[in-house]
Structures are given as structure tokens and as C-alpha cells.
């Protein structure tokens, strides 16, 4: 059996030219003592041409620090790549990548070069120790068309300033076919490489991973030079650069085709054959430029295949990095109360005190909805857009109330509302507040959240008579775009988005968005061929973009109601989004802990005209869902599961898993699985998205903001598994409480579980 691992001595013999890297590795190992590799050292690692942490073409077993987020580009002709990498967990690296092949047109007769999307995953198996190397396993081009399909097992070991890597590669990484597939010894089916995913991609071909009769060894060294932040990478490249130009069908890439030309490809719109492999040794320099406390730029330059310039650049930050607080509320000695209880004041003093508090709160950035004097408790119902961290808003507003409180007030409560929804109630004992702010800012451990209201017989509510009705407006730049089209890789539009809001009452408002075109390149966006078997509820996106360059994006009458402290409801009527108008609503229950909830929504909608004015098309649909929300006790994860009827009348489930990082950013992925099968869906097989939401105050140096930058990306616009885009009560309710540390779910800990079985007494502090 073991003899079949090495079918011939020839399998293990390399050309002397290609032995260089391994010989160098042995010399280094023999001459330097062992070194314990730390996470801090790990962060010096940089990207491959594909975007993941590694050497040049090949990965290493290194991972960036948890929360590392980057964008980058690389080029080694005939390939150019655009990628984004996320260290989603300490043990999981994910890369989303667009690749351009300059040697082929996108479609026959197209003037655009060939493009390909890819998703790569790498999983940590072992941490490095003094004697054991780091070990990782990974898949390149997961669920893609298979053009770059590869799998690998890789180990890395740090010795002084050298980081050594050795790995086994399957698929595209098995270009030299040096040894037999070790898995095939035990499972014969693994000796045959599964076919590509097909030209359309989007499926997981489990029968393909780690298959093939041969695998190749790859490896290399990264030397961290005495020059700070400069490293030298040298690798042995096992990539299969053979391209079957003689094959009539691209899906035959994994098969041998008659007349194919190994290791040579004609460049698109050029006559010369430049794509050849003169050497299996690649090398490159990488320089790390630190541009902030957590922001870095990596610049790489080198030579691939002995004849091709390689270059890459990436900018990255860490979403778990929390900068020093830019706004620190100073120490303060609060006023000593002198006024009689509110109910004992005359009308002039009542008006004076109420107006004074509302005026002072306005000076701190708060809009006061009402004040409540309830026995010995003083409440303010407010809204604010100044602070992302709720404790800062609670601190400032509580000080204003405490400085103006009558003598009988022992408790201060701040009730925050967003779009008519109460998101939290924060209460603090007045004496505790006075003592706390003598030393600086109020902290969350001094505050009690979401206590039930117990109204006394003589409670008094003072409404803000100037608040309703009220008209608000704003105008801001807004970007739209379409990535990877057959005609042009990127279509864009910059518009001025005019937002107006007429607030009739706390619960009822009319909201309007009008887009005014400023700049676009839609003159070349002249066609798009939708596929699939459903009505084109989303794939006619091009027509909405080009025919409605300026238009009414939304005009909706919204009514939001606080039914109880745990139940909220909303109804909407009008032009709900840029493609659909109609009527509908949702009702949401959240538990007291806010860690789980259940929601129901239903809408009847009609498709709007492409010009985004006031007309409608013939298509209408009823869509509705039951949604379960659950905060998992791991890594601040949130799971949302929907089941119901989608916009295209298909039925199924929608799964959304996201993670909140320490700076407030949230990154997640969504898949929709419905009774519209891959043939019904068309290219891509099923609908999927990734998204991120970044807090704007991460980009500010001297100010605070509750604003967020939101972006969602889908490899393809599909009709299956789509929903009406009318916002979410859950997002509205939780966007504030997510920024209160003590309200978020605590991490699961085996240690805490086993401590529960201990027979020894526990200290109070534990």
C-alpha cells in the first residue's frame, strides 16, 4: 500500500534548478536555534497574489490577527486581481477576489477581457510551538467556475528571522505532479480529479476537493531583513500554468485536449506569446508602511516564472482595534438641588424648568421628545445622532437632568428613541451619578438598563410643543454601481440624494428620497441578458439605473408603534423602494435580554416603472416571512433565519450570519435557498451576498457620529431569494443597544461551565 505513495523513484526527483529553495531551507534549519513564533510576529506576514496571507503564489500557515480587514490589487500578467480579505475568526481567513485574464475576451467578440470571481477559505489546524510548526488547510476558488480551483495543506515554522513553509497542493497547485495523491491510497475515488464547476459556477463540487492522481510539493522562505518592515520572499511555485488552448470548450480545462499548447497563452489583443514558465522559483520584496495605529499598507515587487514582473498593494486595518476615546467627558461637580418637587411648583416655574432642560439638552445635541416627573424619578425621552457609544449620550443627558432636578429626585432615567421606537431606558441613582462624575465619565456598570416603568399616581408628562409637526431635509452624495458586466467591468453613478422627512407625530412620518444624477458612465450600459425562469424582479436592474438616472427612489408613509417594551410594529404605504411600491408591515418581539426575537412581516407590492417616477408595471406579488433572530455566544455572532415567500414568488429560507467586531463594525454573509432550483435560478445556482457595516466615527479623528457606511455585494444579481427593501425594525431596535457593552451577549466559556461543578467555595468577585 505504502509503495503506491511513491510509484517510482522518479516522482521524488526534482530538477536541480528547482531544488534551490529546499536546499536553502535545510541550511537555515541546521544553523539557527528554535524560536517561539508569536501572534505579534504573525502580523508581519503579507498577502499572496490571490489576497490571502502567504508567499507570492502560494499560501503559508500564517494568519493575521483576528479582525484584520483589507483591500488590495495584484498583477503578474496575464493576470490582474482585485481582492478583499477578512480574518473572520482567529482560525478562519476568507478572501473574495476578482481575477482578470488579459489573454481572452469576456465573451466571443467582446472587447472586454475575461473576468472570474472567486472565494478562498483557509482554516488553522495547529498553532505553532517550539517544536511543532503551524498547520493550515485551505481551498482556493470555493464554488467558483474552477479556473483557479486548488486545495492545499501547508505548514510554517519560524526560525530566527526566517519563516519556512512547506505544503502539498492539489488542483491548480499540482502542476509538477511530483507524488501520488496520499488520500487516493485509502480512497480510490480521490485519484480522479472531479470536473470544473462549469462555466456558470456557483455550486460546491464536493467530489472535486483534494482529488487527482498527483499532488505537488510547494514551499518557500520569507526572510525578515534587518531593514525594518522589509521582507524577502522566495518560493518554489508548483502552479499548473498549462492552458489547453486547443480545447473547444473551456470546461475541458481539467482534461487533456488534442492540439493544446502547454505553458503558453496569447495575450488578449496582442500577437505575442508571453505567458511561459522559465523558472519555478519566484521571488519578491514586501515593504510594510504603517500609516496609523491600526492601519497599514503592504507593497510587494518581484519576479514570477523567471520572466514576469509581479506587483501588489494592499491597505488594511483591524476591526477589533478600538482607538483611544476621542471625546472624554470631563469631571464635573453637579449642582445641589434647591427646587421643590415638580408638582409643588407654580406653572411659571414648571414652564421655566422644562424649557431650561430642553434647551440645555439641545446644546448637547439632543432632541427632547418629552420630560416625565414620576415620583422621585425624572425621565427624559430623547433622540440623538452625536454618539455611537450610548454611554456617552446617557452620561451627558443625565448630567443635564441632575443639574436641574428638584430636591425629591433620587433617580435619573434617559429613554432613547429612534424613528419612534424606544431602544433603551438607562437609569442611574442620582447620588451614584454625582459621585461618579466627580472623577470623570459615567461608566456602564453604574447604570441599570430597561427597568420597567412603574408610574405613580401624580406623574406629570411635559411634551415638547415645538417638535410636531416638523419638516427635516438633507442632501448628500450617493454612489451606485454595477461590478463585472459583459461590456464593462464597472458601471458607476454619482447622484445627489435629497432626503426629506415630515414628522406628523412620534409614530407617523412621510419619508422621501429623490436621486438627482450628477455623473455616470451608463451611455455604454446598453444591454444585459437576464437568465433564470422567475419573473425578473431584480435582474432588470440595468433598466432602472439607465432609464431612471434621476428619479423618486422612495416615498413612504410610515407608522411605527411601541406596543409594549418587548413588541414593536410598523406599517408602510407608498413607493417603498426604487423598484417596488405597495403596502405592508411587520411586527417584532424581542426578549428582555435582547438576545433573541421573532418577527413577522408581509407586503403586497407592485413593480414600478423603470423611470422611477409614479407609474407601475403589471407585475405584483405578495411576500411574507417569519424571522428568528438569535445572538450566538461565540465571537459576537448573530444569526437570522427567515422562512417564507420571496419577491419572485419562490418559497424557501434565508440565512444570515454576521459578526460584530470591537470597533462596532459588522460583517456577514447571506444565502437564500428556495424551491427555485439551479436550473430555475440560472448562473450562480443560488443567491448569496456578503455585506459590511462600518461605523463612521472610525474615520474621524476629533468628532463622534452615529452614522454608518453600509455596503452589500452579490456576485450576481438574481431573481430568486429576493425581498422588499423597506428597512428592518430589528436593525432599528438593535443598532443602539449593540453599542452598549453590558447588553451584548457574553462569550461562551467551557471554563465557566466546569467551574459550576466545583465543590470549592466561590469568592464574591468570581
Image: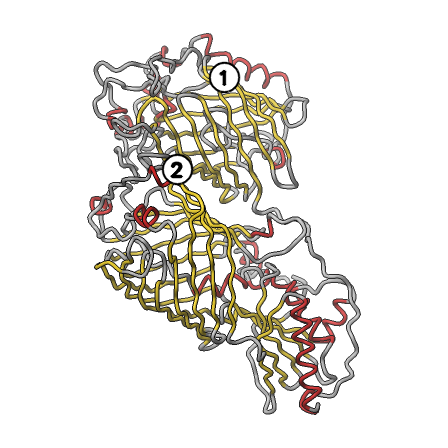
Q: Where residue 291 sits: x, y (%)?
A: 64, 36
Q: Nearer the viewer, residue 756 or 199?
A: 199
- Is 334 left or right of 599, judged from the image as shown? right
Height in image: 596 above or below 306? below
Q: Where residue 160 sits: x, y (%)?
A: 64, 24
Colour basis: secondary structure
Question: Can you tell which quarter of the image residue 99 is in?
Answer: top left
**Mark 2 secondary-structure assignment:** strand
Q: Where residue 445 sits: x, y (%)?
A: 66, 65
Q: Residue at x 32, y 39 (%)?
A: 525
Height in image: 381 above or below 488? below
Q: Nearer the viewer, mark 2 or mark 1?
A: 2
Residue pointed to by mark 1: 303
Q: Nearer the viewer, residue 242 or 402?
A: 402
- Is 592 left or right of 721, judged from the image as shown? right
Residue pointed to by mark 2: 490
Residue neighbourhood size for the residue with mark 1, other residues' Cα within 10 Å, grouped as few (<14), some (14–19), many (≥20): some
Q: Nearer the viewer, residue 683 or 55?
A: 683
Quadrant in the picture for the N terminus:
top left
Q: Whole-Å distance between the Cαs marked 2 and 1? A: 29 Å
- Mark 2 and mark 1 lie on one chain; the one further toward the N terminus is 1
Q: Do the numbered discs 2 and 1 sit on residues whose CB atoms are within 8 Å?
A: no
Q: Where residue 499 sits: x, y (%)?
A: 47, 60
Question: Can you tell which quarter of the image residue 760 is in?
Answer: bottom right
Name the residue at the top extreme. Answer: 16
Q: Residue at x 44, y 61 (%)?
A: 630
**Mark 1 secondary-structure assignment:** strand
Height in image: 678 above or below 20? below
Q: Nearer the viewer, residue 389 or 522?
A: 522
Which mark identifies residue 700? Answer: none
- Is 429 left or right of 298, judged from the image as shown? right
Question: Can you tell which quarter of the image residue 300 is in?
Answer: top right
Amino acid at each position: 500500500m505504502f509503495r503506491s505513495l511513491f510509484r517510482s523513484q522518479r516522482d521524488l526527483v526534482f530538477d536541480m534548478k528547482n531544488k534551490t529553495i529546499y536546499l536553502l531551507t535545510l541550511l537555515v534549519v541546521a544553523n539557527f536555534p528554535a524560536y517561539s513564533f508569536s501572534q505579534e510576529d504573525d502580523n508581519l506576514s503579507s498577502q499572496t497574489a490571490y489576497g490571502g496571507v502567504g508567499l507570492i503564489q502560494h499560501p503559508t500557515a500564517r494568519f493575521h490577527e483576528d479582525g484584520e480587514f483589507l483591500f488590495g490589487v495584484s498583477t503578474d500578467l496575464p493576470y490582474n486581481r482585485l481582492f478583499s480579505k477578512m480574518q473572520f475568526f482567529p482560525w478562519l481567513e476568507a478572501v473574495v477576489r476578482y481575477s482578470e485574464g488579459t489573454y481572452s475576451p469576456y465573451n466571443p467578440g467582446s472587447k472586454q477581457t475575461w473576468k472570474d470571481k472567486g472565494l478562498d477559505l483557509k482554516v488553522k489546524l495547529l498553532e505553532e510551538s517550539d517544536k511543532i510548526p503551524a498547520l493550515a488547510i485551505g481551498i482556493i476558488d470555493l464554488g467558483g467556475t474552477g479556473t483557479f480551483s486548488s486545495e492545499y495543506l501547508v505548514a510554517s515554522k519560524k526560525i530566527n528571522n526566517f519563516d519556512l513553509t512547506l505544503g502539498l497542493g492539489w488542483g491548480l497547485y499540482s502542476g509538477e505532479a511530483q507524488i501520488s495523491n496520499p488520500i487516493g491510497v485509502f480512497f480510490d475515488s480521490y485519484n480522479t480529479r472531479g470536473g470544473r464547476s462549469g462555466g456558470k459556477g456557483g455550486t460546491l463540487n464536493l467530489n472535486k476537493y483534494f482529488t487527482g492522481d498527483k499532488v505537488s510539493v510547494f514551499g518557500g522562505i520569507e526572510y525578515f531583513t534587518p531593514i525594518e518592515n522589509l521582507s524577502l520572499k522566495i518560493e518554489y511555485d508548483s502552479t499548473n500554468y498549462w492552458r489547453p488552448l486547443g480545447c473547444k470548450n473551456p470546461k475541458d480545462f481539467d482534461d487533456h485536449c488534442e492540439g493544446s499548447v502547454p505553458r503558453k497563452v496569447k495575450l488578449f489583443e496582442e500577437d505575442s506569446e508571453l505567458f511561459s514558465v522559465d523558472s519555478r522559483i519566484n521571488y519578491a520584496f514586501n515593504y510594510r508602511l504603517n500609516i496609523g495605529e491600526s492601519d497599514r499598507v503592504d507593497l510587494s515587487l518581484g519576479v514570477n516564472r523567471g520572466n514576469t514582473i509581479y506587483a501588489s498593494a494592499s491597505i488594511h486595518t483591524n476591526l477589533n482595534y478600538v482607538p483611544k476615546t476621542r471625546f472624554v467627558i470631563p469631571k464635573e461637580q453637579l449642582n445641589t438641588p434647591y427646587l421643590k418637587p415638580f408638582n409643588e411648583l407654580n406653572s411659571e416655574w414648571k414652564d421655566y424648568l422644562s424649557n431650561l432642560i430642553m434647551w440645555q439638552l439641545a446644546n448637547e445635541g439632543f432632541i427632547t421628545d418629552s420630560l416625565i416627573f414620576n415620583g422621585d424619578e425624572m425621565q427624559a425621552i430623547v433622540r440623538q445622532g452625536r454618539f455611537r457609544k450610548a454611554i456617552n449620550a446617557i452620561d451627558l443627558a443625565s448630567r443635564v437632568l441632575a443639574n436641574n432636578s428638584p430636591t425629591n429626585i433620587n433617580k435619573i432615567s434617559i429613554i432613547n428613541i429612534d424613528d419612534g421606537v424606544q431602544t433603551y431606558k438607562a437609569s442611574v441613582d442620582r447620588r451614584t451619578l454625582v459621585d461618579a462624575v466627580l472623577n470623570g465619565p459615567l461608566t456602564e456598570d453604574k447604570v441599570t438598563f430597561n427597568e420597567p416603568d412603574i408610574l405613580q399616581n401624580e406623574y406629570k408628562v411635559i411634551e415638547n410643543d415645538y417638535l410636531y409637526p416638523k419638516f427635516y431635509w438633507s442632501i448628500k452624495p450617493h454612489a451606485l454601481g454595477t461590478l463585472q458586466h459583459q461590456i464593462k467591468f464597472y458601471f458607476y453613478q454619482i447622484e445627489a440624494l435629497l432626503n426629506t422627512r415630515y414628522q406628523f407625530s412620534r409614530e407617523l412620518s412621510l419619508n422621501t428620497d429623490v436621486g438627482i444624477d450628477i455623473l455616470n458612465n451608463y451611455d455604454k450600459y446598453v444591454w444585459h441578458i437576464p437568465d433564470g425562469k422567475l419573473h425578473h424582479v431584480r435582474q432588470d436592474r440595468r433598466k432602472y439605473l439607465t432609464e431612471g438616472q434621476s428619479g423618486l427612489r422612495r416615498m413612504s408613509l410610515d407608522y411605527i408603534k411601541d406596543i409594549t417594551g418587548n413588541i414593536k410594529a410598523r406599517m408602510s404605504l407608498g413607493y417603498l423602494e426604487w423598484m417596488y411600491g405597495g403596502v405592508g408591515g411587520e411586527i417584532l418581539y424581542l426578549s428582555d435580554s435582547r438576545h433573541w426575537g421573532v418577527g413577522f412581516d408581509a407586503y403586497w407590492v407592485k413593480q414600478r416603472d423603470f423611470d422611477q417616477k409614479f407609474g407601475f408595471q403589471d407585475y405584483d406579488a405578495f411576500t411574507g416571512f417569519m424571522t428568528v433572530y438569535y445572538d450566538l455566544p461565540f465571537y459576537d455572532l448573530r444569526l437570522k433565519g427567515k422562512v417564507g415567500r420571496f419577491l419572485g414568488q419562490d418559497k424557501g429560507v434565508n440565512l444570515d450570519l454576521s459578526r460584530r467586531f470591537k470597533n462596532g463594525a459588522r460583517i456577514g454573509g447571506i444565502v437564500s435557498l428556495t424551491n427555485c432550483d439551479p436550473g430555475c435560478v440560472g448562473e450562480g445556482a443560488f443567491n448569496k451576498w456578503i455585506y459590511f457595516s462600518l461605523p463612521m466615527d472610525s474615520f474621524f479623528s476629533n468628532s463622534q457620529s452615529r452614522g454608518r457606511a453600509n455596503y452589500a455585494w452579490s456576485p450576481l444579481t438574481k431573481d430568486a431569494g429576493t425581498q422588499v427593501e423597506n428597512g428592518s425594525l430589528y436593525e432599528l431596535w438593535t443598532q443602539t443597544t449593540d453599542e452598549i457593552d453590558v447588553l451584548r451577549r457574553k462569550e461562551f466559556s467551557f471554563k465557566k461551565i466546569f467551574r459550576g461543578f466545583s465543590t470549592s467555595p466561590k469568592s464574591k468577585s468570581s
